[in-house]
Image (cartoon, rainbow, N blue to C red):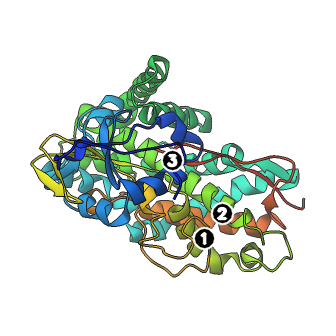
Amino acid sequence: MTAPLALHVDRTPGSDLATDVVVDLSLEALEADPYPTYAWLRENAPVAYVPASGRVLVTTYALCEQAGVDDTVFEPAKGIFNDVYGEPNVISLNGSAHRDLRNAINPPFRPRAVAGYRETLLRATAARYVEAVAPLGRCEATSALLEPISQRAVGDVLGFTDVDDATLGRWFHDYAAYLVDFGRSSDVAERGRRAKTDLLAYLDGRLGALAADPDDSALSHMLHDGLPEGQVRPVEDLIGSIGVLVVGGFQEPAHGAANALLGVLGRPDAAPGAGGQADRLRAEPATWVARCIEEGLRWLSPFGITEKVTVSDAVLGGLRFPAGTEVGLMIGSANRDPGRWPDRPDEFDLDRPAQAHVAFGYGTHFCIGHSVAKVLGQVVLEEMFARLPNLRLDPDAEPVVHGWATRGATTLPLAWDA
């Protein structure tokens, strides 16, 4: 395979250290399309130190899984997550502290709980927003439809029922920009800090009300669950995890749905009446949306990296990782590994044999919101294909897909018969 960016591997002779297998590439070069680079890395250096990232990147499905499920050696990295969200948070904690906090967050995100509000909250929210754009005949779906639906629906699950859509959107975008910038821009960092300050100001009143009068929101469960009656967790112990839920909870459903739509509507056979896979969704959305969302999550994973650090010496892929080695498990690459998906893994295909992907991460840090993300994505697609006749990509505008640490259709122009 030809190196997409004239890449080469520098190996220190006689060394078996992972950090002595060096591939010097630009992170900016990954933003537009990381997949040719991922393919080259999987073939030539599946474990390689990339100086621009400050970590060893692991790119095959098997090696990512091996490290991802071993939380005793490959612990969640604390650096960027603590810088962005604050410490403690549910991503960077491990052991009993992580288990206790996760158990407090979990109740409204468990599959049975999500099934209970699938129609009354998730579908009702999706239907309301889709109905609002239906007369227009076209829209930029990511910003006008999918992100607002995700922010409103998941925001209500979290307990932000009194926060308007614009504020939820600002919190999400400012936090998310800081997370994926890796500390390169002081302006982006300031946006992230300002979002956290605004969120803290809101929580100052909201958590006090929930302390006195609990409800079934995620905020209320985080405040009370697992503690003796009358005790609550201080906001300092919660703000980090609330930030995680704002970014992950708002992004995964919205961009998962956008990526699935781009995948199925971007196929060569996607034109209405062409008899392709998109026509299946137009005719029977309820039958096909679950498979469409799963394939979209594999094909274009909204979160592209899981960051780890070795807490003791380790060996992965025949290379040594001394304690303290920063590691990036490249989910976006793992989910297109032909070693896992041998038949055209770079293509979106509803007929692909069902097989687990890793878009939601690994082990004890598997995404808390995976069930709501998938179910919300399913009902959004059902409502769109049911209410927007002959839904298709807008022929007069191009989608924009961007990013590698997070990746998605940042703009998705769609059209339909109004």
**Residue 292 - label:** 1
Amino acid type of the residue tagged 3 in the rendering: Phe
**The one of 242 and 350 positioned closer to us in this rendering:** 350
- For label 1, the SS is helix
Q: Give the label, 2 or 1, closer to the camera.
A: 2
Q: Nearer the viewer, residue 27 or 358?
A: 27
**Where residue 68 sits: x, y (%)?**
27, 59
Dot 2: element: helix
User: Quick one: quadrant of the C terminus?
Assistant: bottom right
Q: Nearer the viewer, mark 3 or mark 1?
A: 1
Q: Position of residue 341 (x, y in %)?
A: 47, 73
* Image quadrant where residue 318 sits: bottom left
Check disc 2 and report the residue beneath it. 263
Disc 3 from disc 2: Cα separation = 20 Å
Regarding residue 369, the answer to whether it shows in the image is no
First along the sequence among labels 3 and 1: 3
Residue 16: x, y in percent? 17, 50
Query: Residue at the spot x=64%, y=51% of the render?
Result: 146
What residue sits right under mark 3 in the picture? 250
Q: Residue at x 72, y 80 (%)?
A: 284
